[in-house]
Amino acid sequence: MKRLLHIAALGAFCGICATQAFAQHSSSATQVVTFSVHRSTVPASLVSLSSSVPDGRRADEQILSSKHSPSPRSLPKLTVTLDSRQPKNLAVELGTANAVVDVKNELITYATRKSVVLTVSD
Amino acid sequence: MKNPYQNTRLLLTFIISFPYFVPSMGKVISSLLVVFVLLFVIPLHAIAQGGTSVVQIVTVEVKPITKIAVNGNPGALTVVGQSGDPSASSVSDNNTRYSMVTNLDNVKIVASISDEMPDGTRLMVKLESSKGVSNGPVDISRALTPVNVVSGINRGSDLNQTITYTFAASESVNEINEQSRVITLTLTD
């Protein structure tokens, strides 16, 4: 009986030692990452993504473009919101937007071949 | 080796018991005894360092230290743009920092995510490190079990290191409402 007790005590001691030897020491910190995706899907018939503005021409209707040609000044990026439920003349919509007016002035002032990046969403 | 006190005791016993055997010498012996005490016993007591001692056992232990902390959450990662436009497919945030300290060698930082990312999206994390080797942008989109982001960190501290999160969405993904994931960074050996 005494020998059994000794063996049990020895086993417990060894177990504790092994646990200590292989114990992982760690510390954790957490962060919350928030994400979302919002991409527009505009009907192709309404937007021409690669048209360009010819030299000296007023840009009432051909202002949509996704190309960015080299220029001495970077052109502003615009966001124009269209209501697809009430189809209107795209040129009128763009022509009344203040931001587009600024771009038109920019184009007329420089009278060179330039491109404007527009993002149109419904 | 004989104890010097044993010799002294033997001598005293002899001197004190001497008058018993030679009664006529009693007075002389008494005088000798007084002289002996004055000459030897009192100086011996004076010379003897009779202090006491106590013993204490001081146990010293340095426990393993691993500590990591971050300074907040990254901003919302929102992919916007034209559908099918490959240039608008990912967004990054590098505004958060982490600090760590350890007294162990060869520890690492692992990252895990609370839930898998939606199909067609990826979340990557990159941790800068001056004490270890950064694994660069590591895809943790499916990392329900931790993956290594920094390894080979030796003892010391690393303060205000940049964490960069990159969220990417394939062109086929047009709309995902705002979702969140908990990212756990663990410093471990």
Image: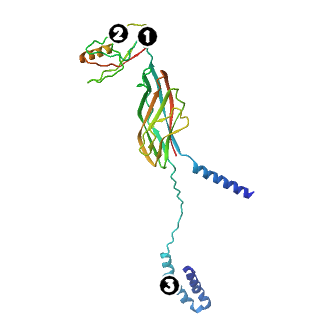
**Quadrant housing the N terminus of chain B:** bottom right
Residue that badge 2 annotates: A91
Mark 2 lies on a secondary structure that is helix
Residue under numbered circle 3: B35
Tell me if label 3 and label 1 are in contact, CB under 8 Å: no
Q: Secondary structure at mark 1?
A: loop
For marks 2 and 1 on the same chain, the one whose residue lies earlier in the sequence: 1
Residue name at image x 60 percent, y 86 percent: B17
**How would you rate the neighbour count of disc 1 (Cα within 10 Å): few for under 14, some for 14-19, many for 20 or more?**
few
Q: Percent from the top left, x then y, of residue B20? A: 62, 88
Subunit of label 1:
A
Mark 3 and mark 1, same subunit?
no
For disc 1, the marked residue is: A84
| Gap in angstroms between the C-alphas marked 3 and 1 | 130 Å
Residue B176 % position (x, y): 49, 22
The amino acid on which the numbered mark 1 sits, given as a three-letter code, is Ser
